[in-house]
Image (cartoon, grey):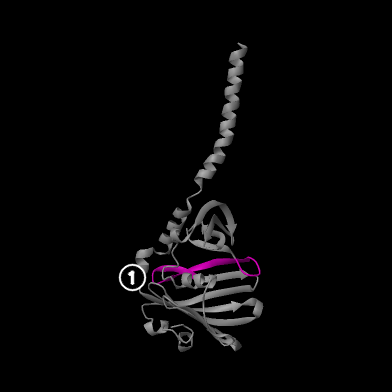
């Protein structure tokens, strides 16, 4: 009789252990795969097929740099597959321009003049130049792992730890909409890692695509809010992407 009672007691303890353990396992399994989250975001913005309909886009925006107490206007031009020019008119500073013609990345400003962009900064320019950069491509990451759900900018989001080249960080996907809510990044520099947070605070409908309408950037250099006021498709003159004469002069034959 005692052996039967002991057996029953062991079974009850085992069942209690399993029932306590299973919820934790189920919770871990319930987290969606990072690739699935990226695919959901891509569908939410309109999908690659809709991007394929267009060959170029021109984006207009205003910039508010709270730390500097300055306002700026910005125009960004993109063309398939990877041409890019960005012009920022910054009050008394003047025009700051950056571009990529598919081969050469460059920048110009009134203080430093024309410069070729190389190293880590080159990868950043190439990312901006990607016509499909609003879509998530798992192939661009060396690591992407869903690690939990957290509050991000007041929204319940899935947190995905990622590595992209030397940039480490986390991306946050809105659990309600599937859209990318923002990301944190740690970028190496000679002075040590620079931590920054980018928030896609609002999305808008542009040409049937759901694109960021208001972006908030937080870094040690200060906070910047970018508000996009217009996006036009297939109206960009190809001459916009031609290298300025001052940049051409820097290229070795």
Q: Nearer the viewer, residue 63 or 82?
A: 82
In the image, farthest residue toward the top: 1
Range covered by the magenta-colored residues = 188-212
Q: Is residue 183 above or below residue 97?
A: above
Q: Is residue 130 above or below residue 164?
A: below
- Please say whether residue 247 is one of the residues in the magenta stretch: no
Mark 1 lies on residue: 53
Q: Which secondary structure dominates the residues rendered in magenta?
A: strand
In the image, farthest residue toward the front: 253
Q: Which of the image's four quarters has the N terminus?
A: top right
- Please say whether residue 208 is one of the residues in the magenta stretch: yes
Q: Position of residue 213 (x, y in %)?
A: 50, 71
User: Residue 123: in sight, yes or no?
Assistant: yes
Q: Which of the image's four quarters has the C terminus?
A: bottom left
User: Residue 59: in sight, yes or no?
Assistant: no
Residue 120 in which image quadrant: bottom right
Residue 155 in which image quadrant: bottom right
């Amino acid at each position: 009789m005692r052996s039967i009672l002991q057996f029953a007691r062991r079974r009850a303890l085992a069942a209690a252990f399993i029932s306590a353990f299973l919820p934790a396992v189920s919770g871990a399994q319930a987290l969606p795969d990072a690739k699935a989250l990226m695919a959901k975001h891509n569908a939410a913005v309109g999908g690659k097929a809709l991007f394929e309909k267009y060959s170029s886009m021109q984006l207009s925006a205003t910039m508010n740099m709270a730390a500097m107490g300055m306002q700026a206007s910005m125009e960004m031009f993109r063309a398939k597959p990877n041409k890019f020019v960005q012009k920022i008119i910054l009050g008394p500073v003047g025009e700051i321009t950056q571009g990529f013609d598919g081969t050469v990345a460059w920048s110009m400003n009134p203080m430093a003049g024309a410069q070729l962009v190389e190293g880590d900064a080159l990868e950043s320019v190439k990312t901006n130049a990607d016509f499909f950069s609003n879509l998530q491509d798992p192939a661009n990451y060396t690591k992407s792992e869903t690690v939990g759900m957290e509050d991000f900018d007041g929204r319940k989001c899935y947190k995905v730890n990622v590595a992209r080249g030397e940039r480490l960080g986390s991306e946050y996907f809105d659990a309600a909409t599937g859209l990318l809510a923002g990301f944190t990044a740690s970028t190496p520099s000679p002075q040590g890692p620079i931590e920054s947070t980018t928030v896609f605070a609002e999305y808008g409908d542009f040409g049937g695509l759901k694109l960021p309408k208001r972006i908030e950037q937080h870094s040690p250099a200060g906070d910047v809010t970018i508000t996009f006021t217009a996006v036009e498709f297939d109206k960009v003159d190809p001459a916009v992407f031609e290298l300025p004469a001052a940049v051409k002069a820097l290229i070795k034959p």
